[in-house]
Every structure is written in structure tokens, then in C-alpha cells.
Image (cartoon, rainbow, N blue to C red):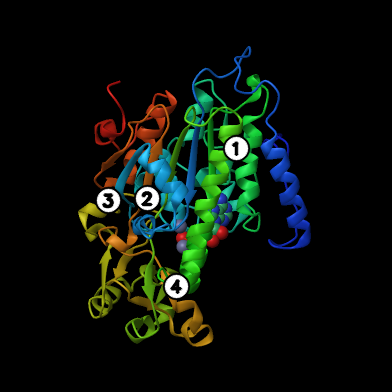
Amino acid sequence: MALKQEGVAPRVGSGPSGAGSLSWGLRSALAVILALLPAPGLGQASPGRPTRPPLIVVSFDGFRWDYLDRGLTPSLSRLAAGGVRAQALVPSFPTKTFPNHYTLVTGLFPAHHGIVDNTIRDPATGALFHGSDTLAVRDPRWWGGEPLWVTAERQGGRAAAMFWPGSEAPIGGVLPTYWRRYDARLPDSLRVDQVLAWLDLPAAQRPSVLLVYLSDADDVGHRDGPDAPRMADAIRQLDAMIGRLVDGLRIRGLEGAADVVIVSDHGMAAIDTSRVVVLDDYLDPKAIILLTAGPFLAFDPRPGLEDSAARAVARIPHAHVYRRAETPERWRYRDNPRIAAFVGVADAGWQVVERLPLEIRPQLFTGGSHGYDPADSAMHGILIATGPAFRHGVVLGAVGNVHVYDLLCRAAGLTPARNDGSPDSVRGFFGGR
Ligand code: AMP
Ligand code: ZN
Ligand code: ZN
């Protein structure tokens, strides 16, 4: 099937140079000017204009729940004070980026939507999925369920995704009207400006559901750890992006008139090479096909070696590794053939890794990581919901991230597709409606 072309909205800053270069600086300056100049007529009633307020979903990859309490986030705090904040957003298992971003927009546990890890081997076809493989992420066969943007498009709206796992694939034959090829180097400011530019489109083309993905908290968290001074800078910068978004909405007459929901996919735990278990000491690397190692471990034994693998994993210290059928029930991580035959987690702060990468690049195993049990509070993320759909000045308890899709659908006036969440679990976010 032919893919729709990338978004047709005014493009800002798609180019090959790195962040911080003069060229980006100029582009950013231009983008600020463009972003600060709303299209004529915006904020006024016009024929064909979507009647509901737009819903903007912002994801901060790897933004741990307690980063909000470090006194570094004035814009987020202001939004939270005027809306609803959950104490924590509890990720689904495994606490990785692709499974959880796709759970957030489908309401399905990873076993039910099929993105069971960032790296997947489909036993039916032998095909491999990796988040960095453009062909794989655009292949709709990997992506089950119905993501928010498909729900919106099917119900007569337009959706726009400024990066989001799944948004490049025609899922159920449907792409968001506006989307962009993933480019990790595109500065956050330009991502926010693209969202604002989409809101400047003429009414008939304007999206009503918009998503934007920012990865800095994850990038810095991995490299330096959740408590490093550089983490504070990253948190401040992400907060500034919310300030930029809110300023852009204000100029367009949309501050307080748009619903803005800020989420993260998981948290981040400090790691170091003093808490590493070498997998090779327990399992012959040639006896398995290793898919993932670290806080989260997933592998398939070579044929005939299942029982010896089961005996071996029982001896791995500082970790709990199970056959797929015996994983803890609360992980909901059994009923999909794409789940590896053996899966498990290391204890908090520990990692189970192969000897070779550990010896070649030990720096990869310091700083921060995620993939631990979702019950570990270091893996918990954020959920802030603000705008006309939501109550004001409310703090709620922890929410499981399978409920976010129902929350987003209700805010956008969409009928949710069948999913694992329940609208009742997020009723407290909404007023008397
Ligand atoms: P991880 O920390 O391994 O769970 O994954 C985080 C990484 O996924 C980030 O560094 C991003 O660069 C990458 N990533 C996030 N979204 C996408 C996407 N839509 N396409 C490709 N890569 C992505
Ligand atoms: Zn992530
Ligand atoms: Zn990460």
C-alpha cells in the first residue's frame, strides 16, 4: 500500500544539521517568529472549524514522576495547578519506550497490541522489529489495536503526530493526516512550533488531535542518571517547551481553550557497573537468541535447550526470570507469541548483561536505565491533564497507563475502541459531565 506523504503543513526546520548549530539557530529564530504569528482568523469562528477544543498530547520520554517535585518546572506546575495531576502514571510491562507509548494511545497492554518490546522477533515470520528500523516501524503488521489518531480520523476528525511510535504506519489502513518521519535531532522547539503551525491551518484542514514527542529526559537520564546535574538542565528545558506551547496557545486565543495532556512512558533508575550480573556466567550465549538485556531480559533458547535454560535462569542472582507462561499475572505479559520464551527483570538498580558489550563499552552500563518491574516507583511517569475538559486544581492517586486512551478519547469527544482500560478509572479527571 502506498504511504501518504509526510505532513503537508508548513514545515519548520527539517534538515540534517545538528542541534545548536548556527543553521538551527537561524531556523529556530524564524520558527519563533512564525510560531508567534498566528494565522489570520484563528480563535474566531469560521466555517468548517472543528467545534471542539483541540486536544494536544505531549510525551516526555523517561520523565520520572518525581521530577515534577524538584522545583525546576514552573510551567508544568502552573498547568498542573490549573488542571489535574496524577501522583504517578504507572507504566505497563515492559517499562520500555515503544510498548508504553503504544499502550498510552491504544489502552491495550503490550501483549494485546503486539509491540511487546523495542526489539521483537515474530516467530510466525521470523521478522525482526526494532524501533530504529524505519521499514519496521512503518509496517502496519506490527501494530495491533486502534491508536488515538486512527480513532480520531475514523470519527471524522483530523489527527497530527509530531513523532510518536506507530504514527508512521498505516494502522488499519489509516495514517494521521499530518505526521513526520522520526528525526531524533530535530530540536524540541521546532517540534512544538510544528504543533502550533498545525493549529494555524484553515479550519477545514486543522487537526483536532495533536501529539508531540520529546526525548531529552530519557536521553540525559540514560547518559548521566536521574540525579545528575545535567538532568536538572534537561528538566528545565522540557518545562520551557511547555512554556513555549502555552505562549503559542495564548497568542492564538487558545490558552485554557485547548486540552493539553502531558504524559511520560516510564521513569528512570540509577545504574552503575558495580551492580551487574554477567549473563554468560549462567547461560551459554550460543544456546540462546538474546533479544534484550539490562534491567529487562528477554531471550529464546535454541531448540531443545528450553529445560536447561530454565535451570540456568533459576541461578541468576539479583533477577527474576520466568518462562513466558509463568510471568507474574500483574504484568499481563503472557498471551502473545511475540513475547520471548523467557523474560524477566533485574532487581532495582541491577542489570543482567552480556560480557562482550560490558567489556567493550562499559560506559553504556552506567548512568540510568529503565525496563524494571512497573511496581518499582522509579519506573513511574507523569500524567497532567488541563483544559476545558478537566477539573481544576486536583491531585489524584497513581493511574495505570492503560487508562490514558479512555481519558484522551473522552477529552476529545471520541468513542474509544475496545481496550484494556476503563473509563471509570479516569472519571476523577473530569467534572460533572
Ligand atoms: P528506549 O530508551 O530504548 O526505550 O527508547 C528511547 C529511544 O527511542 C529514544 O532515544 C528515541 O530516539 C527512540 N524513539 C522514540 N520514538 C521513536 C520513533 N517514533 N521512531 C524511532 N525511534 C524512536
Ligand atoms: Zn522511553
Ligand atoms: Zn530509554
Q: Can residue 416 be seen at all in this image of the molecule? A: no
Kindly identify the residue that appears in the image at 32 percent across and 65 percent down: 372
Of the numbered discs 2 and 4, the one sitting upstream in the chain is 4
Q: Can residue 71 be seen at all in this image of the molecule? A: yes
Which callout, 3 or 4, points to the residue nearer the camera? Answer: 4
Which quarter of the image is occupied by the C terminus? top left
From the viewer's side, name the closer residue of 273 and 67.
Answer: 67
Residue 424 appears left or right of 133: left
Which callout, 2 or 3, points to the residue nearer the camera? Answer: 2
Residue 315 appears left or right of 148: left
Return the residue at label 2.
382
Return the residue at label 3.
332
From the viewer's side, name the closer residue of 361 and 33.
Answer: 33
Element type where label 1 sits in the image = helix
Return the residue at label 1.
248
From the viewer's side, name the closer residue of 345 and 2.
Answer: 345
Return the residue at label 4.
228
Give, as a three-letter code, the residue at label 1: Gly
Q: Position of residue 338 (x, y in %)?
A: 40, 54
Of the numbered discs 1 and 2, the one sitting upstream in the chain is 1
